[in-house]
Amino acid sequence: MKMTSRVQFTHELESLDREVEEMAGLARSAIEKSVRLIVTGDYELRDEVRRLDKEIYRYDNMIEKHCLDIIALHTPVAGDLRNISTCLKIIEDLNRIGRYAWDIAEVAEEFEGQKFKRMVNIPHMADLVVGMVSDAIDCFVRRDAVEARRMFDRDDEVDALYDTVFRETLTYLFEDPSRITVGIQYILVARYLERVADHACNIGERVVFMVTGERWDPTLRKRNGNGNGHAPVRGGSDLSEELTEEGYNQHELSEK
């Protein structure tokens, strides 16, 4: 690749990073506004969430085209190609986050004129989820694989909150079956937030691959019965395992 071509390529990659960061800001704002709509009943926010969802979709198409243009013009390899392919994957997650924000805004219509007294966990879940989206993109911008791995601990917390919301809402509905429609919608909101957290973790997992070039399976943390997440030994090789200070496993394949 010639020097002038390399300079142009570097500028294209920097521009691509900025576009992904901007799209992430839209997705984060959409989630914040949709939850505020649920909590405050400010239904003017519904149109704003809809506008953001459309803008996120526009960014999705724009960034996808930008990535394909870069590949066609510069034929990137190795780390550069990983960066571009990661961007293509991340915008899928951001697009889904925007869609979940709109789903929450639509659910808000079921709450109009009604109060559901046990909403305390939803704002807390939303704070955690919005923070995860922000931190996932920050890891992408800083190319920080260590912090990207740590995000999965917060996903466990979001999952636990969802389980709590589900159980407490069912208990409340047994006490007052007349609120079943609102209760079901409330559970849906919690479920959508839980899915947004999963997409934030997807972004973190993609950052790990982008930085290290290795596929990292976060489910190894809790897959096995001993709780340490060690992968089973396969084939005839020695698989030596080291648990890092972050609590995740690194695997080194040693030859016989």
Image (spheres, helix red, strand yellow):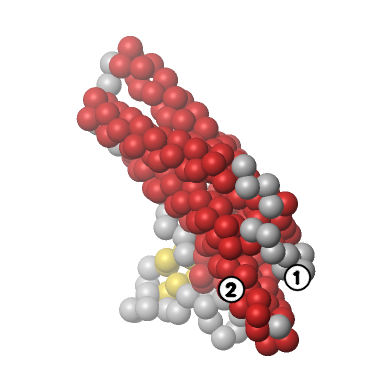
Q: Which residue is mark 1?
A: 118
Q: Residue at x 57, y 46 (%)?
A: 46
Q: How many numbered badges does the structure rendering display?
A: 2
Q: Residue at x 68, y 70 (%)?
A: 161
Q: Quadrant of the N terminus?
A: top left
Badge 1: residue crowd in 10 Å (few <14, some 14–19, many ≥20) = few
Which label lies toward us, 2 or 1? Answer: 2
Q: Quadrant of the C terminus?
A: bottom left
Q: How far from the left and from the top, in percent, is residue 82?
A: 37, 42
Q: Callout 2: helix, strand or loop?
A: helix
Which numbered disc flags the more N-terminal residue, 2 or 1? 1
As shown in the figure, which amino acid type bears the numbered disc 2? Thr
Name the side, left or right, on which 30 lies relative to 171: left
Q: How far from the left and from the top, in percent, is residue 118?
A: 75, 70
As shown in the figure, which amino acid type bears the numbered disc 1? Arg
**Residue 79 occupies quadrant:** top left
